Image (tube, helix red, strand yellow):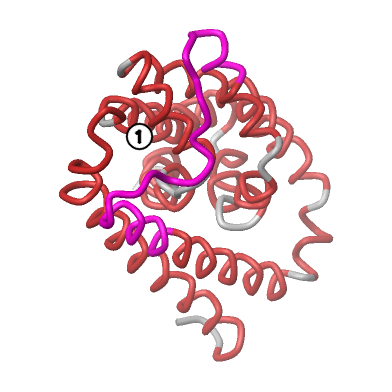
Amino acid sequence: MSSLRRAVVDTALITPSGALSPGPLSASAIAAGAALGILGGVLVAVGHLLVELPYYILLILVMGAVESRLERIRRLLDLVAGGFMLFFSILLVEAGVELYNGLPLHGSGIVSSPLTAVITGAVLTGANAYFLAWWFTVGKPIIDQARRVGWGGASVVYLVHYSYDLGWLALLAGLGGLAGVAGRIILAPLMFILAAVLGYYGIKMISRVFLGKV
């Protein structure tokens, strides 16, 4: 398997743990969808892009400079990443329960215009500590792969990652007016499945720290 193909596959497998996680951004997409339809989710995703892309580029540049130092604490980073995976898994379960019970995700707010949708996406991304930490822990393998395939390959990797963000937020916006029914039938089961997958990888990573490579 070529380096770029491996990078794309790894990105496709890792990205859902972050892009499809519940939180203010997902909630704002549902709120935007109630007023703007699918376009609301797209605009929230544009705001997200305005913050995430520069952060992604910065991490590619910075990670190389601190790689040797990070290697010294590799086990600690694996432990932190595994812990975050388990934490995100719990959040997914909680969101699944809320959606199954017909409740909206927390922090939806009112997003009624295209401009506020973009601003909301940017603010909720930049002010989200979990987002920032995800890229430096769970998402670090994506950064590592992007560094290996050069800037052209890194662009492809990011497009794969961002396609999840865009598709997910557009889907949530499209379902915004049907959150109760759609949440119970579609979104809640998806949240539970993702929680199980993410929990498995979190336990696997933590086990590797204490028991060696598994």
The x, y position of residue 123, in whole percent, is 66, 27
Please name the residue shown 69% across and 47% down the image.
129
Residue closest to the far bottom: 211
Residue situated in front as seen by the camera: 86 or 208: 86
Residue situated in front as seen by the camera: 77 or 86: 86
On the picture, is 58 further left or further right than 121? right
Query: Which region is colored magenta?
Result: 92-119
Q: Secondary structure at mark 1?
A: helix
Q: Which residue is mark 1?
A: 168
Q: Quadrant of the C terminus?
A: bottom left
Please name the residue shown 50% across and 31% down the image.
158
On the picture, is 200 further left or further right than 119? left
Q: Amino acid at mark 1?
A: Trp
Where is residue 55, by image quadrant?
Answer: top right
On the picture, is 120 further left or further right than 108? right
The x, y position of residue 179, in whole percent, is 27, 38
On the picture, is 209 further left or further right than 58? left
Please name the residue shown 34% across and 65% down the image.
197
Against 167, is 146 above or below? Answer: below
Where is residue 78, by image quadrant?
Answer: bottom right
The x, y position of residue 175, in whole percent, is 26, 31
